[in-house]
Amino acid sequence: MLFDSVFKKREQKIRRNYEIEDSLYSKLEELSTVYDASVTDLINECLSNLIKTENIQLYEKGSNEISVTHTLLIRESNLSGLEKLKEKYGVSIFKLVNIAIRNALNESGV
């Protein structure tokens, strides 16, 4: 069907609170003005990409970097994928979310 190639099927989304580094979130806010996507949509795609690639790259957090809690609607498949990565690599969900965003921004050259 034509729409299957353009649109994703609806999936249940669950409200979650995540601490996201302020600099990463600011870049996502900027991107949401460029793309037809909300910050939550962008984060869901970042998480999907991390779950697919399992590209867990730890990085040093800047000394002046603050993390702010944001409430997001995360796709159910992303939540289960994050849980599997947490178990496999022993990295907290909070850190995985930030790694996913950083990886996607780096891949996009932002």
Image (spheres, rainbow, N blue to C red):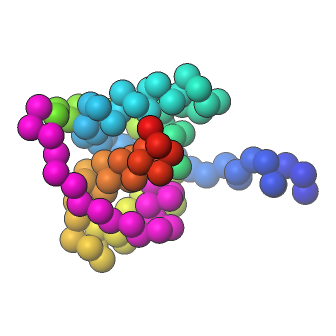
**Residue at (53, 49) in percent of width and height:** 45
**Residue at (33, 36) in percent of width and height:** 24
Name the residue nearer the viewer: 67 or 110: 110
Name the residue nearer the viewer: 98 or 62: 62
**Residue at (25, 51) in percent of width and height:** 94
Left or right relative to 71: residue 2: right
* Residue situated furthest front in the rendering: 109
Could you say where residue 84 lies in the image, as x and y percent from the top left? 37, 71
* Residue situated furthest left in the rendering: 63
**Is 91 above or below relative to 14?**
below
Examine the rendering and report whether any part of residue 69 can be seen.
no
Could you say where residue 55 lies in the image, as x and y percent from the top left? 39, 66
Write down the quadrant of residue 51 in the picture: bottom left
Write down the quadrant of residue 15 in the picture: top left
**Is 18 above or below relative to 2?**
above
Q: Dividing the image into 4 quarters, which one contains the N terminus?
A: bottom right
Left or right relative to 11: residue 103: left
Q: Dividing the image into 4 quarters, which one contains the C terminus?
A: top left
Name the residue nearer the viewer: 1 or 99: 99
**Residue at (35, 32) in percent of width and height:** 25
Residue 101 on the magenta span: no
Could you say where residue 73 lies in the image, as x and y percent from the top left? 46, 40
In magenta, the rendered stretch is 47-64
Could you say where residue 27 lies in the image, as x and y percent from the top left? 40, 31
* Residue situated furthest right in the rendering: 1
Examine the rendering and report whether any part of residue 75 can be seen.
yes
Secondary structure predominantly adopted by residues drawn in magenta: loop
Residue 52 on the magenta span: yes
**Is 82 above or below relative to 33?**
below
Count numbered badges in the picture: 0
Left or right relative to 71: residue 33: right
